[in-house]
DNA sequence: CTGAAAGCGCTTACAG
DNA sequence: CTGAAAGCGCTTACAG
């Protein structure tokens, strides 16, 4: 276990001041008018020895850790793990590392996590906030730390935000269903007040109203397991025999709902057409394949990271907020009628 | 943006030495025989002010960062994102944070990531290694850093390891299929030399041999997208009309394979029985539901973390290696015959 | 029990 | 161009 090289060792071995080495390593050789020859010599030595500056010391001294906190509802969810993957690529390209945390939608846990991450001095935050952590978010902002919310926002607090145009997502889904002659269109959603869920509901309601159709909404409790969800959906279908189309507000609701439709002995799409909100790998290979309102995951990640990076690099003032609303894509597959 | 409190500020305000404050904060008050009254006073003050020690400074001084690197093939994969979720819970309970990185199975990228994480002085590593990073793993070990590999290992290097009993996973799957009267059992696997894939193949071959059945293996190139995989599987099915059962070596191979079986106009399980290696949420709600050799994800995460933590806390010597082989669970669902 | 001091490994004004 | 020095905010022997 060879002792790790420090900037001091390098300075000593090369008989130069460690400040000189530091400047060279940080690309300030020109600026500090250090001779090209010396610069070369130092860089070569560093290269040979495989020296890597201790980031802890650097961070303590500069106040920057080059770490970003990704605080999501649950890292194992399809949506979040894919966002995590895309963000990672962008972060690494720019010299940042990502620490992830799952809130499981518990504000208490989110508070604790933010507090822990603050003690580690991460440079910026990307967060899907549970309701109730407004004070902590505000505190981050007050202390000059960049915070970008995504997927859902906190109505009381102005922040940077990247989200889907959920309203038009369901609106356009309804429009399509009406256009393919569905008359009785239900929305199956979660019993949740998160902004993205409310927007999906509102888009649905608005489109139905436009077409003078009666809304029909099933709210599934958030905590339910798949089995319970299926049962509730089956009951819902039985109670509404005139149903001829369903929009599911999340991809897992759709999966359980389709099982329910199968169990009820109905055919997709001839008896009931189905559109899922939020795409999923398996929708493509399901039988029938499932139409979906897709969130462009890479685009969302790209926008999220851009907003954060601009603030981290002081290209944008902290007070100047960006809201990016990404347009979803309605992907038509086998679970809806051809038009 | 109020200035952050430091241990110096606290010492000054309370008119005590900062070493005293440090001892108290680190629970060494008793050991250092600091009066209970003073201890109380300091803790109360700290509590009131909401002081959080700067972890960077602490890390620089102690050499411990309380951070763990989770280096996986791809964070958005079902298996890895679920392992990540379970590990997170364990890590946080023990005061650790996790930085994740995706190697995408590229040794060059893995090397770069390890180098970057070393500069950040993470305390320990949990890794699914791509072939070719043996030297880097060895270097970590030589420098006394705990490393636990999982899912696959590097044959040349003795390390801590947590993996599935892949051999018996496919072996038992074949046994079951034979027992439910399948005669012509194929294995669809990836064109990969990773240890876990080889073990799955070997278990399959051994079980077939025992029953004097002829093996039939399709190797799908690793890089293929879903569509290509489906095409290859369809062709494979057509080429082998006597096929009556298939074991898919990964969950995504199973999903594309099932699509292929559907497209070939065959019925599951009456024409072809199907077992997938590695369970997936959607298998349960698929129609028919899909039998699977399930990896106990929480158990794997638990073992992984325990091994790592024991080393981090010096409960186990670095040289003493653990290998934990976890037994898979064969979950029978609708894609296989009842027995 | 307490205080002064050195050290972790960097950065960065400041003076030459 | 270079060197000595202070500072980031902790920990921890060491001496009283």
Image (cartoon, coloured by chain):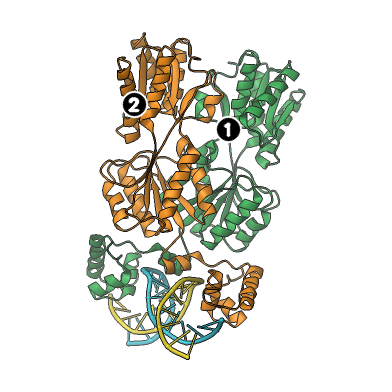
Chain colours: A green, B orange, C cyan, D yellow
Picture coordinates of residue B132, whole percent (x, y): 27, 43
Q: Quadrant of the N terminus of chain B?
A: bottom right
Quadrant hosting residue A328: top right
Q: Nearer the viewer, mark 2 or mark 1?
A: 2
Question: Looking at the image, is B4 positioned above or below residue B257?
Answer: below
Left or right? Give the position of A36 relative to B325: left
State the residue in front, A284 or B75: B75
Mark 1: few, some, or many residues within 10 Å (few <14, many ≥20)? many
Task: Residue at 35%, 34% (x, y): give it.
Answer: B196
Q: Left of A253 or right of it: where is B121?
A: left
- Residue B60 relative to residue B201: left or right: right
Label at residue B203: 2
| Residue A317 seen from this side | no
| Helix, strand or loop status at disc 2 | helix
* Residue A285 located left or right of residue A154: left
Relative to B192, does residue A24 appear above or below in the rendering? below
Q: Chain of mark 1?
A: A
- Give the Cα distance between marks 2 and 1: 38 Å
Looking at the picture, how far across and down is residue A98, in whole percent?
Answer: 47, 51
Do the residues bearing badges 2 and 1 touch, measured as CB atoms within 8 Å? Answer: no
SS class, disc 1: loop
Near mark 2 (Cα within 10 A), the count class, few <14, some 14-19 or many ≥20, is many
Q: Which residue is mark 1?
A: A278
Query: Residue B320: horizontal and vertical position, in percent?
Result: 33, 52
> What percent of the width, then of the height, locates residue A59?
44, 65
Q: Quadrant of residue A295?
A: top right
């Amino acid at each position: 276990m060879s002792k790790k090289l420090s900037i001091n060792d390098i300075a000593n071995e090369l008989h130069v001041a460690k400040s000189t080495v530091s400047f060279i390593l940080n690309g300030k050789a020109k600026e500090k008018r250090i001779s090209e020859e010396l610069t070369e010599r130092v860089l070569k030595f560093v290269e040979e020895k495989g020296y890597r500056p201790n980031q802890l010391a650097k961070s303590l001294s500069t106040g920057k850790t080059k770490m970003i906190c990704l605080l999501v509802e649950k890292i194992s969810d399809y949506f979040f793990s894919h966002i995590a993957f895309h963000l990672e690529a962008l972060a690494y390209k720019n010299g940042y590392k990502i620490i992830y945390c799952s809130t499981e939608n518990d504000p208490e846990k989110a508070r604790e996590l933010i507090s822990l991450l603050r003690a580690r001095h991460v440079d910026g935050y990307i967060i899907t906030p549970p309701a109730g952590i407004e004070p902590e978010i505000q505190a981050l902002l007050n202390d000059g730390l960049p915070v970008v919310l995504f997927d859902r926002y906190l109505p009381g607090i102005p922040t940077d935000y990247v989200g889907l145009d959920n309203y038009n997502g369901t609106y356009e889904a309804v429009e399509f269903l009406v256009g393919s002659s569905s008359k009785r269109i239900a929305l199956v959603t979660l019993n949740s007040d998160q902004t993205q869920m409310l927007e999906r509901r509102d888009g649905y309601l608005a489109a139905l109203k436009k077409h003078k159709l009666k809304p029909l909404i099933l709210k599934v409790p958030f905590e339910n397991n798949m089995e319970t969800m299926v049962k509730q959906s089956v009951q819902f279908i039985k109670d509404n025999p005139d149903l001829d189309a369903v929009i599911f507000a999340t991809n897992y609701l759709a999966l359980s709902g389709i099982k329910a439709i199968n169990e009820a002995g109905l055919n997709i799409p001839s008896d009931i057409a189905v559109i899922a909100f939020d795409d999923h790998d398996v929708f493509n290979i399901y039988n029938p394949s499932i139409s979906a309102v897709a969130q462009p995951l890479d685009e969302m990640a790209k926008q999220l990271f851009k907003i954060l990076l601009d603030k981290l690099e002081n290209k944008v003032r902290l007070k100047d907020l960006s809201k990016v609303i990404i347009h979803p894509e309605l992907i038509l597959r086998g679970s809806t009628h051809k038009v």
